[in-house]
Amino acid sequence: MIKRRASFEKFLQSPFAMILPISIWAVLTFSSFYWNHQIIQSSSHQAFTMRGEMSKNLSDIIMTWASSHEAIYVPLTEKTPSSPYFDIKNKDIKTSDGVALTQLSAGQILSQLSLLLDKDSVEFQLISTQPLNPANQASTWQIKVLQSLLDDSQRHIEERNGQFYYIAPLFAEQSCLDCHKDNQTADLLGAVSFNYPIERLEQRLDPLHNQNTFIHSAIFIILSLISALAIYHVRSLVNRISAQKAQREETIRLKTKNLHQEIEQHKVARAELQRLATHDPLTGIRNRRHFIDSLHNEIKRYQRYKSNFSLLMLDLDHFKKVNDTYGHDCGDYVLQCFAKEIQENLRQSDVFVRYGGEEFAIIATNTQLDAAERFAQKLTKTVEALTIIYHQQTVNITVSIGVAAPSLLKTSSPESLISLADSALYQAKALGRNRAICATPDYDT
């Protein structure tokens, strides 16, 4: 039972579960469509055949009626049909009232019938192997048809050269047969040929075929949607039951997993908060808060172990002019490039921070004051040689640096050391910028 249920669930989840009912409906609707298509085609042919039968019966009635009367007279008008092949002298007469009458033959009556049928794109023709009217001369294939009609006396239906043909034999009356006992074909006068353009017939069938296509397409789409919705709901029900079962079985494991995930997320979030707390978001280097903490630690180390270090305060020259000339976005880009260039010239143990705005600071660990001054002079030249390209604009900058060390102070503290380095920085700016100045001893602080 469990295996069967698993197989059923697997079948529901497979694409074949959707394809199978749609394929069945496709086969059934196409079969119905094709069957209806054949019925429409057959009905149209039957309707044409019935029309041919009616025309044939009408011809027989005309021929029978004409043969049962010695003469048929109609008023002589412009619309009266005439033909040189039927005109015989002295066939026109006048009544006592002076009305002009003319005699009509059966052929003339049938010719008039042909003209009426031709208005509906139907061609009606009397054909014979020996006609009085040459226009009724049978063609080669029609002669073969006449021969077959003589043998079986059945109608002939054929599609030929884009036309639908209905050909039926015309036989003479019995009284005429007695006059032609020596002729084998005396009883067959000819045939009635009734043809209709297949293209015209197809045009009349197009609405029915379009309706048939539309109905079956709509049925197929509706049945396919119903099947798809049914499969979808059954699949959803099975999935829901399976999910509930799996959820009950895996509750402890999922809760444990979620707990571990939450712990990891908290660790990542805490690390990110710590990074944001100690790093500048624009340049990616350390920020002022980290600088103060690091300076406290270095001063404590200096006071305990006499571990020398130096402090460098850096300030970009005329940075406001960069913002005013190129915009603040360019100014931010310049700060990023500057920070990257300085970072590449530092040791791993050095602490490089953004102190605020365009002002930066470097804690050079294990560095004497004279070495720090030389390093600061090198940095000014490095920055002066730096070329920054922003949106096809070349931006050149310089930096002023103030250098100090705790050995220059009587009592070292972060505030006093920063103030001493700032004084040297202001002196560098006052002397023309783009230079590094070392602070003088200040034992009063």
Image (cartoon, rainbow, N blue to C red):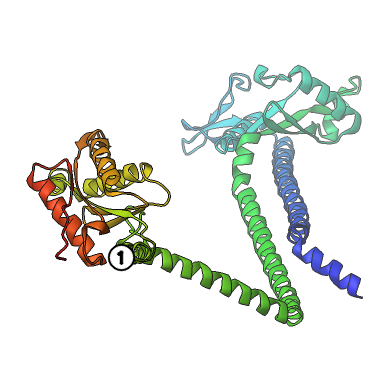
Image coordinates for residue 359, horizontal then vertical, percent: 22, 54
Instruction: Rate crowding at label 1 as few (under 14), some (14 to 19) or many (20 or more) other CA atoms within 10 Å.
Output: some
Give the residue drawn at x 67%, y 61%: 219
Under tag 1, what secondary structure?
Answer: helix
Residue 368 versus residue 289 in the image, above or below: above
Judged left or right of residue 265, residue 322 is left
Badge 1 amino acid: Ile
Circle count: 1
Judged left or right of residue 300, residue 63 is right
The quarter of the rendered structure image containing the N terminus is bottom right
Choose top left, top right, bottom left or bottom right for residue 231.
Answer: bottom right
Residue 412 versus residue 152 in the image, above or below: below
The quarter of the rendered structure image containing the C terminus is bottom left
Nearer to the camera, 200 or 4: 4
In the rendered image, is residue 362 in sight?
Answer: no
Image coordinates for residue 101, horizontal then vertical, percent: 53, 33
Nearer to the camera, 334 or 78: 334
Image coordinates for residue 291, horizontal then vertical, percent: 32, 62
Judged left or right of residue 337, residue 211 is right
Choose top left, top right, bottom left or bottom right for residue 63.
Answer: top right
Give the residue drawn at x 25%, y 44%: 373
In the rendered image, is residue 20 in sight?
Answer: yes
Image coordinates for residue 17, horizontal then vertical, percent: 77, 62
Residue 29 versus residue 50 in the image, above or below: below
Residue occupied by mark 1: 292
Nearer to the camera, 103 or 21: 21
